[in-house]
Structure formats: C-alpha cells, structure tokens
Image: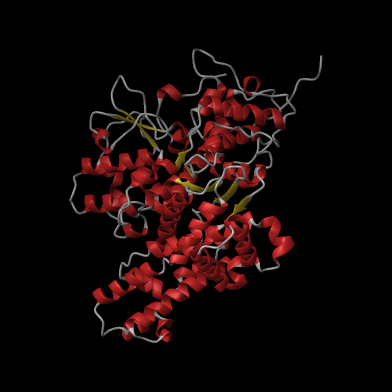
C-alpha cells in the first residue's frame, strides 16, 4: 500500500485573478455562455458580472484559442487626451451631448483594427504602407469597377496617412483637434483661445450659452462624416460578409482608471452603442467585459435621444455559476496541483449529524463565483498542517482571513458607486442573523448622524440616503430600508420575504425589489461575512471534532 497523501501548506489551486492564474487553461470549465460569446452569429458581446465571476478568464480563453484576436487595452489608447482637451471639458460644463463624437471615435478605432486584421497577411508582404491602394484594387477585382462613394471613402482613409493605420493615439488627437478647429471657426474665435477654459469663456463671452451649446452640438453632429459611414458599409457588404473567417476584438479592464470618470462612463456608453452597430458584420465579434457595479453607473439608453435600455439587452451575457460548475472547477484544480491525489470528494470532510459537507460549507460562504472558491481553498492549504484532507478545524481557521478578504474585496468593488461601505456597515457588528428592521435603532448609526463631513465618506445613492435621513426628509425606518436594500444589492445582506421563502441573495433567481424591503421580512448577513462581522447565528456555530 502506498504512502498516504499529505497536503502541503505551500500548495495553491491557482490565482483568484485570471491575469495571474498560471493553470487557467489547464483547468478551464466551458459553459453554454462561452459558446454564445465565441459564436459570431450570437448577439452576446458584453460579459457582465461581478469581480471574480470569470470575465477576464473568458477574454483570455478567446485570445488563447483563436488566431484573429486583437486586445484593445483602454489605458494604451491614450484616451486621457480627451479629458485634457479644453474644448471637450468646456462642452461637458455646458452639458453638451458628446455621445455622437465618442461614437465617431470608437467607429474609427474598430474600423481600423478590423481592417488591420483582415489584411494582415497581405499587408506585410505587398502593401508596404500603401494599403489603401490594395483595398482599391480588391474592389476592382471583385466588381470590375469602383463605386464613386467607395472611391471617396478610400480616399478619406488615405488622407489620414500611414498614422491612421498605425497609431490610435494619432487618430484620436486628430479627430479631437478637428472638432476644436471647427468649433473655433463656428463661433468666430482664434484656436489659441483654447489654452484654458477661462480663456475660451472670455473669447466667446459675447455669445449666449444657448447659442454656444447649439453650435457645439451642430459641429459634433457634422463630425459623423459620410465617408466614415461609407467605409462601414464597404466593410459590411464587401469584406465581412460571411462567417467562415472569425475575427475578435476584445476589451478588458474598463473598470481601471484609464480616463477621468465622467468621460469614462460616456465613452463606455458610446462603445456599447457602436458594438451594436458592428453586429451587422458577419464573422466579427467585439467582446468587452463590464463589471456589474460599473454597469450601474452608466446611463446607456437614458440620456441619449432614441435610446432605450431594452435595445441593448441582447448584447449582455450575465455570468453565473451553478454548484455543479464550481464543483467541476474545484475538482480539476485540486487534481491538477496534487497530481490526481485529491478531488472534491477526498479533500473535504463528509456530512456529519445531518449537516453540510466540508465542500458545501465552503461553497455556502462564496458568492457562487470562482474567485471566492479559489481564495477560500488557498487559505485552507495554508492551514493544512500535512493533513490528509481539509478537516473542520482547517476549514474554520481558513474562514477568518477569507472573510476579511471578502469584505475588503466588496469595499474595493463598490467604492466607485457608494464610497466607504465599511462605515455604513458598522451596525452589522455582532448582529443577530435574521434581524428585522424594528430591531435596528438610530443609535447604531450615531457616528454617521453626527458626522459633518459625510460627503468625504459616501457617494451616489448611499450619500443621498444619509442626507435625506439627517435632513428629516425620511424617518429612521425609511433610512433603514434604503440601507438594507443597498446592502442586498452589494451582496452583504440576504432577504427572507416570508416563512415559505428561502433567503435570497443577489445571485439567486429570486428577484428582490425595493418594495420587498418591509418591516415584516427578515434579513441575513451573507455567510462569507459571518466571521468578519462576528455574526450571532446559532445554526452556524462550529461543531466539535
């Protein structure tokens, strides 16, 4: 009989981040959603999910398994130039709708990147930086002549010189400078007045705000050149007209600070609208990953004329994981790092006294996503002490640092939306699980009520709720309802609507609305945060070994 396997505390089942996960492809779990994403006939183009749900893993899978893939990294597109533009920041201060202009930018970027991929082989061998001549000849071969509109469109690309082909930053700068020059001519001033917003305002002080705004919007509208539209039509009708060759543009890391936030939200809005336009291309898929909290901050389909959210829903692919999917993932990773010595069945303790197994205990303390599971098991390895499997003691000790990690991750994930959620969550310390609104008192929020600088701590709907309460626009119960619903949306609390209902967390199929936050319901801290908040819950007290 061979020597019994012992778990080493230096083992890990990979990294919680796809970007640094060395065993991602060796243990990858495919899903129906992945098939939809890589299917160029499917509309699913926007990977929507929370941190750690597998968005970046799918992007990496596409890069690793297809030949014609181009990643567009937002921080490498030099889009900060836009937020440094005096004329654009001035337009924003006048509440000028920049959506049309941003759509032009994305059309340029996507058009050129797709052309570069389409002509990849011929470009290196034949074109020698005269690619537009080759494009012209291609149309001659195809139809025997060139339509005047197509000729004009090709000449339009030619006027941008080789930089149009090579340098995204150059194109963005040229388009922005062109907009500035046209605006200067339109309002009758010298372009040198664009050195600062104050100079610009001084130069056009004789014009009314209404006139300036109208002129700006007119110029932005004119920036949608007929040639660019014709280029789009050429690509749709003459180049990308079948599904035999598949080309992918992928965009990740939109949640990073690649541009000032107000511009970032508008640019992502415009990108989504343009992605919908490019669905007309056969064999082409533009795939972006979008974190759910960032999606909450977008105004897509609200502020733009004719835009409805419903039109863009077919583009969204929301990531979700079943218990079986996560078990398969963990099985593969355990086998991989232990040379097939451990799997889920052998790594965790069995069910005792009609309670859950070790795996179920861990799974119940995740938000049903890979990152949580990987993080918990890695902490269990650290506490393994050469045991043959993860005992109750190992699992319970691993829960302490894991729970801290989960709350810190939630703080980071939702800070952009709400500010310091740790501050508002202090009332949960030592709370009895299954609490009701009537059990809460204003004393639990005393520090916040007495805080004269809440703008430094909170933002968005959370700041509005605190302000309304402190200004007596809502009573304490109204305030508690707002906070509880917000914490449900974040993932910290679950809602039990009645004795016949299960506890619903954000990832469950049960939909919870604001109207469901009532005095008669019970509220539960998510099990991943029991340790962090020292929640009092008799059903979850550890058994003795």
Residue depicted at x 42% and y 79%: 181
Residue 257 in sight from this viewpoint: no
Which residue is at the far right?
Answer: 1
Left or right of residue 363: residue 1 = right
Left or right of residue 527: residue 437 = left
Left or right of residue 456: residue 397 = right
Residue 6 versus residue 418 in the image, above or below: above
Asked which quadrant contains residue 370, the reply is top right
Residue 203 versus residue 275 in the image, above or below: below
Image location of residue 473, percent across then percent down: 18, 50
Residue 305 in sight from this viewpoint: yes
Image location of residue 306, percent across then percent down: 30, 53
Image location of residue 140, percent across then percent down: 61, 60
195 vs 506, nearest the viewer: 195
Asked which quadrant contains residue 350, the reply is top right
Residue depicted at x 45% and y 24%: 540
Residue 360 versus residue 204 in the image, above or below: above
Residue depicted at x 34% and y 46%: 309
The number of numbered badges drawn on the structure is 0
Quarter of the image with the C terminus in it: top right
Image location of residue 154, percent across then percent down: 55, 66
Quarter of the image with the N terminus in it: top right
303 vs 25, nearest the viewer: 303
Left or right of residue 454: residue 237 = right
Residue 523 versus residue 417 in the image, above or below: above
């Amino acid at each position: 009989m061979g020597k019994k396997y012992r778990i080493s505390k230096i083992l890990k089942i990979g990294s919680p981040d796809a970007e640094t996960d060395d065993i991602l492809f060796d243990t990858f779990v495919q899903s129906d959603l992945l098939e939809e994403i890589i299917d160029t006939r499917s509309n699913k183009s926007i990977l929507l999910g929370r941190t750690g749900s597998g968005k970046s893993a799918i992007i990496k899978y596409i890069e690793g398994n297809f030949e014609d893939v181009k990643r567009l990294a937002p921080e490498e597109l030099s889009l900060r130039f836009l937020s440094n533009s005096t004329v654009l920041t001035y337009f924003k201060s006048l509440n000028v709708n920049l959506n049309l202009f941003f759509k032009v930018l994305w059309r340029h970027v996507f058009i050129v990147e797709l052309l570069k991929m389409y002509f990849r082989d011929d470009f290196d061998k034949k074109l020698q930086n005269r690619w537009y001549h080759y494009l012209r000849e291609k149309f001659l071969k195809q139809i025997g002549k060139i339509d005047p509109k197509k000729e004009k469109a090709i000449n339009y690309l030619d006027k941008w010189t080789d930089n149009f082909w090579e340098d995204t930053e150059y194109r963005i700068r040229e388009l922005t400078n062109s907009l500035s020059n046209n605006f200067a001519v339109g309002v009758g001033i010298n372009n040198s007045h664009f050195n600062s917003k104050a100079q610009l305002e001084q130069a056009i002080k004789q014009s009314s705000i209404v006139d300036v705004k109208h002129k700006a919007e007119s110029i932005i509208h004119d920036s949608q050149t007929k040639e660019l539209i014709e280029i789009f039509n050429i690509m749709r009708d003459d180049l990308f007209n079948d599904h035999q060759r598949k080309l992918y543009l992928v965009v990740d890391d939109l949640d990073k600070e690649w541009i000032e936030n107000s511009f970032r939200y508008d640019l992502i809005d415009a990108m989504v609208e343009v992605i919908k336009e490019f669905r007309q291309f056969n064999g082409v898929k533009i795939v972006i990953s979008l974190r759910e909290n960032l999606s909450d901050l977008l105004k897509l389909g609200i502020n733009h004329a004719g835009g409805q959210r419903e039109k863009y829903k077919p583009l969204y692919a929301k990531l979700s994981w079943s218990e079986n999917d996560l078990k398969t993932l963990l099985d593969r990773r355990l086998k991989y790092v232990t040379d097939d010595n451990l799997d889920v069945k052998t790594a965790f303790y069995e069910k005792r006294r009609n309670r859950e197994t070790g795996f179920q205990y861990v799974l119940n303390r995740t938000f049903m996503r890979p990152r949580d599971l990987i993080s918990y098991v890695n902490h269990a390895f650290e506490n393994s002490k050469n045991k043959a499997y993860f005992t109750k003691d190992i699992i319970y000790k691993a829960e302490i640092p894991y729970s801290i990690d989960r709350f810190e991750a939630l703080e980071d994930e939702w800070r952009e939306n709400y500010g310091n959620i740790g501050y508002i969550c202090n009332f949960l310390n030592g709370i009895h699980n299954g609490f009701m609104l009537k059990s809460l008192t204003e004393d639990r929020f005393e520090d916040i009520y007495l805080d004269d600088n809440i703008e430094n701590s909170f933002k968005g709907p959370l700041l509005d709720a605190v302000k309304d309460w402190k200004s007596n626009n809502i009573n304490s119960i109204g305030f508690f309802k707002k906070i509880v619903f917000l914490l449900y949306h974040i993932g910290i609390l679950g809602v039990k609507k009645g004795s016949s209902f299960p506890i619903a967390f954000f990832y469950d199929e049960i939909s919870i609305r604001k109207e469901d936050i009532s005095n008669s319901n019970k509220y539960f801290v998510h099990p991943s945060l029991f340790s962090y908040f020292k929640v009092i819950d008799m059903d979850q007290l550890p058994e003795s070994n």
